[in-house]
Image (tube, rainbow, N blue to C red):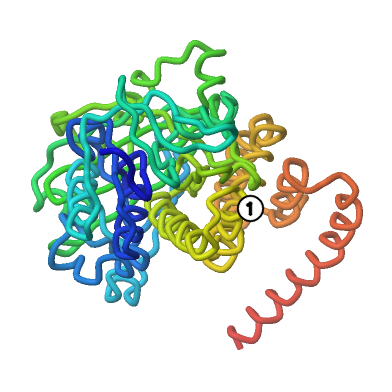
Amino acid sequence: MEKADCIVVGAGPAGAACAISLARKGFETVLLERARQPGEKNVASAVVFTPVLEQIVPEYLQEAPLERKIGDHAFVYLTGEGYGQLRMRFPEHYQQNLAFTVYRSQFDRWFAEKAVEAGAELLPDALVTDLVWDGNRVVGVKVGEEEIRANVVIGADGLHSVVGRKAGLVTDDISRYLLGVKEVLDLSPGVIEERFQLNEGEGACLECVGYPLNDICGATTLYTNRDSISLAVFGWVDLIREKSIDLNERLQMVKEQHLVRNLVGDAPVREYQAHMISDGGRVSLQNLFGNGVLLCGEAGGFVVFYVGISTGMLSGMMAAEAVDRAREKGDYSARGLGSYVSLLQESGLLDSLYDTRRFSNYLVKRGRENFPDFLQRSFDLMGEGLAGEFSFQPRAVPASREFFYNLEENIVPGFMRLPLRSMVKILDPAVRNLKRINARRKLG
């Protein structure tokens, strides 16, 4: 091919969404994928929140390779044998088909096929090694010895974005990277539903922190598929290296934890994968686009924990819209593509990107030192509070005040601590008195 209108590098959810949108707008679009087929390098399941997907493929319920519709969401703090769990079920979300688990290997392949149906040309087994330049403007990509030229190149090629790096938009910052190891464990549908207390076809997602990943500020995810469980642990790459951590060993420790052991039992391993992801804090706003180039999906830092696929797809849609507006102006320079920022703002993604970066900065600068201890102490306080309630033993310092002191020591800025401590000291006795009055009233 001598020249296309647009080249999209990466056929994951963000790239496929961008290619679908571009093709439907009449752009001659080439979608490049380095694997032999889209999704080949993803074995574990993920959660897809459907509002964005429904905008792109309204008939997704009848066509997409969905596993289980999510009925239950749980946030869990794990200790060696204990745990604290907040489990939620929202019937309206379930009725609205808000979220499903999917296998990325199946979902990515299906979604890329939708791009082909829309008119994009999919070229698998095409590893982009460099960009083609005309002065200071990107005018194409190199695939081996071959050049493919286009008016615009969209980088949707993930964490190790060749497009982002070669365009000078992305630099490595190992403090922003996490390494994950994942297992897919075989388990029959009936056993899954019994152990997770689900109705037939329903799914559950557990997001866990704490044991045994506190020293690397890590997390555990557990998702139910139709006939398997996806279990993964994540930790910060620099901490893993610094402490010489064997992440697979930590995964096996999670499998022996009381709650997890009761859920997965001795289910055999079907697949195993290691994968690196970013936390979304590495790409600044001005580096989302340049002369003849745009970034979307994980390449552009659109990674929001738990809803990453949806944010990636939406960023791909907005990138396509920015290219369309640039065509109207006849200007594919950074200035012509600058509407990308306002489109991200209108979609809500800009706020999401800002929040993710802010949380990333907190973790890197302060949270790693304070956050794990805060989680453990909060869990201990809840246990002590419950024990005190059941035994009716008086407490020298009310649990609510203890909890606040624990909170402010780790999170609240120093200049706010004194006034907030004073407020808690004043309000805590008042709240306890109201509780006593209410209890007396109920007892008559």
Residue 287, given in percent of the width and then of the height, sits at 61, 41
Q: Decide if residue 10 is on the left or right side of residue 370.
A: left
Is residue 381 positioned above or below 203 on the image?
above
The quarter of the picture where the C terminus appears is bottom right
Name the residue: 41% across, 46% down: 207
Residue 264, quarter of the rendered image: top left
- Three-letter code, disc 1: Arg
Task: Name the residue tied to disc 1.
Answer: 335
| Observer-nearest of 134 and 57 | 134
Is residue 86 visible in the rendered image? The answer is: no
| Observer-nearest of 3 and 235 | 3
| Observer-nearest of 408 and 148 | 148
Residue 426, given in percent of the width and then of the height, sits at 86, 65
How crowded pointer 1 is (Cα within 10 Å; few <14, some 14-19, many 20+) is rated as: few
Name the residue: 38% across, 23% down: 129
| Observer-nearest of 252 and 279 | 279
Residue 55, given in percent of the width and then of the height, sits at 33, 69
Q: Decide if residue 100 is on the left or right side of residue 187.
A: right
Residue 252, quarter of the rendered image: top left
Is residue 388 visible in the rendered image? The answer is: yes
Residue 433, given in percent of the width and then of the height, sits at 76, 73
Q: Secondary structure at mark 1?
A: loop
